[in-house]
Amino acid sequence: MSEPGEINFDNLKPEEFENYLPELFASGNGKVSEDPRLQKLYAAHPDCLALVRDLETIAETARSLFEPVEDPRDEVWTNIQSKLREQSEHPSNGNAEEEAEDYLPGRLPEPD
Amino acid sequence: MNCEGQLMTQAPPSNPNPGLFKRNPPIAGEAEAIEAAKNGDAEAFSKLYTLHKRRVYTLCLRMLGNVSEAEDMTQEAFLHLFRKLGSFRGESAFSTWLHRLTVNLVLMQLRKKGLNLVSLEETINPSEEDAPKRDFGAHDPVLTGSVDRVALERAVASLPPGYRMVFVLHDVEGFEHNEIATMLDCSTGNSKSQLHKARLRLRELLRNPIQSPEPDVTAEATK
């Protein structure tokens, strides 16, 4: 398949256009819905524009999921403390190669 | 596909990545805590846990889709961090480095579980029948220009593992396709294609939410 930069999109069929979508979205040249090369195609096939806009909306909303909303239970930290203590007291229980890079943890305080 | 190589067992390389560094700006007091933790300061390690537990846990939860496994993996990630912290050179944001470490651990865990390994491979190299269907002939009901965050979270949780992995890594976590290709041992073209199919599947799920079962993730989130 040709690279999107070499294509005349004006007369593409919608199913042909979709083959280029992964690369068009990945190329990172602004919004695919606003790409000047695609405006004639969109005018002829509004479903193509609707699809592109939906996919843009999904990608944009996904970025908002980056901010985490949930904390692990307190037991997770308790277990980490316990494991580290165990490793410092019984270093032979762990992976020997990794232990060579470890330092003794001591008693870990509670997190804030 | 074989990702059981050294990438999975070593601490992640701390290559500079301007995009992710911008997205993960340094946190006040973090640099001092890192240096102190490197020298065995337990209080400092506790602070690093406090600063990053939520993000690490959320990443595990999204990738694994299971609270119990996400907690276990969070624990593993911080234990691994404790051992590998000395190799962090500060060339990228610490949270970026920790993310990559966590992703590597999760991928290794998934590959240890035969079932998940198979489903990941199936969706990384899907058969045509697995790919989301498009029907350009019919009128396409569209999303209304906005997607509810909770609805998207729920839809993501119901994606097949391979689609979910690429979508979370790229669209949520901000990894580039070449980075994902390295992590998943596939081509960048494959990563782009999988992401596109994941978005198409999400579009279907968001337009027809009845198809999307109540996942473990959101069940926990609403507690």
Image: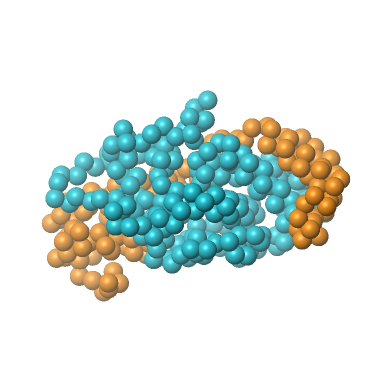
Q: Is residue A22 above or below residue B67?
A: below
Instruction: Identify the chain drawn in cyan.
Output: B
Q: Is residue B148 left or right of residue A9?
A: right
Residue drawn at x 17%, y 64% is A12
Q: Is residue B202 left or right of residue A77?
A: left
Q: Is residue B94 above or below residue A3?
A: above
Return the x and y of residue B2 as percentages of the image width and height: 52, 63
Residue drawn at x 54%, y 57% is B20
Q: In the image shown, does B190 or A36 lie closer to the viewer?
A: B190
Return the x and y of residue B211 as percentages of the image width and height: 32, 36
Residue drawn at x 17%, y 51% is B136
Residue drawn at x 44%, y 51% is B119
Q: Is residue B61 left or right of residue A61?
A: right
Return the x and y of residue B152 as percentages of the image width and height: 39, 39
Q: Is residue B89 above or below residue A7?
A: above
Q: In the image shown, does B23 or B207 lie closer to the viewer?
A: B207
Numbered marks: total: 0
For chain A, the rendered hue is orange
